[in-house]
């Protein structure tokens, strides 16, 4: 069996681009291939979503290729961590040789984001949840945060610290939307608008254009490519709920199962991980993910972050590009977790580089804490 | 209760859920009960998620519940919804979670783990939504 590795990673334009989705997709794919030293004609596997109903088909057509493997699993922001697992199997088995995983959105330019989400009238959620008027997905995360605040002392300060830490990292990343915006201050937090209590705008991710791509091939094929390959050591996923009322415990997410599966496959310990990229759609998402993944005990995540260890220079580098909160959030952020993890392992991150980063974890979350997928990567 | 016009979304119903919605016209909170494994479930389905059987019938819930969590919505999700209002997950005494709104004093001062009971919010077509307060 062949050993799949990651050989390319790149972002498309980020922020406010006034470009179409496929234009941004083409940028992401081309730049990731350039990074790898491969050409569009080398792609024989493609995984993407968010373009149209037939997303992978659409992108293959746009790129002018006829791949032997496609996947458009639609699971929100964690889809891209899931694609790593699918691509791994496809390359390992020999179904295909070079898989590109990509995503792009122009949601900011196109003003296509709605606070109520996309209502599909035939679903149970439309029948039994939409009539009450929740913001979607925001109000679900807000209820998770509300419960956390009710149960755990110091949690409000911990959510604020997660937002402040992300901003500190963004100040080191010239690509970050908030690069140059300065530190997040207590008065910024205090004046931040309440959206769905207890979550304020400072707890919510950016709404931007953006995206990226990574390239996966076999270790044999990687030998004559441009850069040191990144090893795919473990992955795991867990899908828990679509409805707002299925998952009993708002504070314990599928990150637990997802993380346990990935760590078991990788055969490494939590304490071995040098850099962690978790989906921060909201501050509470980071907090619950850190606990679910086992970096902190359940209920101890607030204490874990409050000593500022997740900031630049701290002992637990978290969301080192500035995260969805301060760098970029194109609706589905999962691809950018992978791009940053790869760059950290290659030592390409400039002033935000984590010294001697050898093991990285990327953890995606999709929907309303619905889907979780974890990938553990290693420097070759 | 709020005006019916502040509940602008009229849900579709289907063969499975029709008895629930019919019950709301008479202000009865009906939830599915599995006669095979003796468990309640919410939302209504064609199968029992506890035993995978289809021996489901409708039972009246007590209407008593506990607030699992809540959020005060400050922005409108769609045209016609008028913030501020409070969305909640409540755990019915029958051990199923429902999404709802809080009304009355509980909307003014919500708190997790408080006990609430069902009230009804009429929709413009004569059906009603179970809200709690
Ligand atoms: Zn049953």
Image (cartoon, coloured by chain):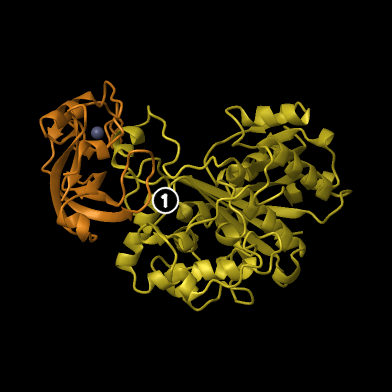
Residue A321 point in image, percent of width and height: 65, 62
Which chain is indicated by disc 1?
Answer: A
Quadrant of the drawing holding the C terminus of chain A: bottom right
Q: Is residue B42 shown to the viewer in this render?
A: no
> Where in the figure is residue B84, as x and y percent of width and height?
30, 52
Question: In this view of the protein, which residue sits in the foreground, A228 or A115?
Answer: A115
Which element is circle 1 on?
Answer: helix
Question: Dividing the picture into quarters, in which one does residue A65 lie?
Answer: top right
Q: Is residue A153 left or right of residue A274?
A: left
Q: Which chain is orange?
A: B
Identify the colour of chain A in the image. yellow
Where is the N terminus of chain A found, in terms of image quarters?
top right
Spot the residue most to the bottom.
A307
Left or right of A214 on screen, residue A361: left
- Of residues A199 and A152, the one drawn nearer to the viewer in this rendering: A199
Q: Position of residue B37 (x, y in %)?
A: 21, 35
Tell which quarter ligand 1 is in: top left
Q: Which residue is mark 1?
A: A138
- Tell me which residue sits at (37%, 46%) in the image: B76
């Amino acid at each position: 069996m062949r050993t799949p590795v990651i050989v390319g990673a790149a972002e498309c334009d980020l922020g406010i681009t006034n470009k179409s989705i496929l234009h941004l997709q083409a940028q992401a794919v081309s730049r990731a291939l350039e990074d790898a030293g491969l050409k569009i004609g080398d792609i024989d596997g493609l995984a993407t979503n968010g373009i149209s109903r037939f997303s992978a088909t659409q992108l293959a057509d746009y790129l002018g290729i006829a791949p032997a493997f496609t996947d458009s699993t639609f699971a929100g922001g964690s889809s891209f961590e899931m694609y790593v697992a699918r691509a791994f199997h496809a390359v390992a088995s020999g179904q295909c040789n070079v898989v590109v995983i990509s995503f792009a959105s122009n949601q900011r330019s196109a003003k296509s984001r709605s606070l109520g989400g996309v209502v599909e009238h035939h679903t149970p959620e439309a029948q039994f949840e939409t009539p009450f008027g929740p913001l979607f997905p925001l109000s679900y995360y807000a209820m998770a945060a509300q419960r956390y605040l009710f149960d755990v002392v110091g949690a409000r300060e911990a959510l604020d610290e997660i937002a402040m830490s992300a901003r500190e990292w963004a100040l080191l990343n010239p690509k970050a939307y908030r690069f140059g915006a300065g530190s997040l201050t207590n008065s910024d937090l205090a004046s931040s608008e309440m959206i769905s209590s207890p979550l304020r705008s400072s707890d919510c991710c950016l709404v931007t254009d953006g995206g990226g791509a990574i390239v996966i091939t076999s270790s044999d094929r990687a030998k004559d490519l441009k850069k040191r390959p990144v090893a795919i050591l473990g992955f795991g996923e867990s899908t828990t709920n679509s409805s707002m009322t299925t998952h009993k415990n708002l504070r314990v997410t599928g990150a637990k199962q997802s993380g346990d599966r990935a760590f078991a496959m990788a055969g490494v310990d939590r304490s071995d991980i040098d850099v962690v990229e978790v989906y921060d759609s909201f501050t509470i998402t980071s907090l619950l993910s850190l606990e679910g993944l086992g970096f902190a005990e359940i209920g101890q995540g607030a204490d874990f972050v409050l000593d500022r260890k997740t900031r630049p220079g701290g002992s637990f580098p978290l969301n080192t590009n500035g995260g969805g909160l301060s760098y970029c959030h194109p609706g589905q952020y999962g691809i950018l977790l992978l791009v940053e993890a790869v760059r950290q392992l290659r030592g390409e991150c400039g002033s935000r580089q984590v010294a001697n980063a050898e093991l990285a974890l990327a953890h995606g979350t999709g929907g309303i804490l619905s889907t979780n997928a974890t990938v553990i990567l290693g420097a070759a | 209760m709020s005006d019916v016009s502040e509940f602008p979304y009229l849900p579709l119903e289907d063969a499975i859920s029709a008895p629930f919605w019919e019950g709301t016209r008479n202000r009865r909170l009906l939830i599915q009960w599995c006669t095979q494994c003796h468990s309640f479930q919410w939302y209504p389905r064609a199968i029992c998620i506890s035993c995978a059987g289809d021996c489901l019938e409708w039972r009246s819930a007590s209407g008593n519940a506990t607030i699992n969590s809540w959020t005060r919505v400050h922005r409108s999700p769609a045209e016609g919804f008028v913030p501020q209002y409070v969305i909640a997950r409540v755990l019915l005494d029958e051990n199923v979670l429902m999404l709802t709104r809080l009304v009355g004093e509980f909307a003014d001062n919500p708190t997790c783990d408080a006990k609430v009971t069902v009230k009804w919010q009429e929709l413009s077509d004569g059906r009603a939504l179970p809200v709690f307060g």
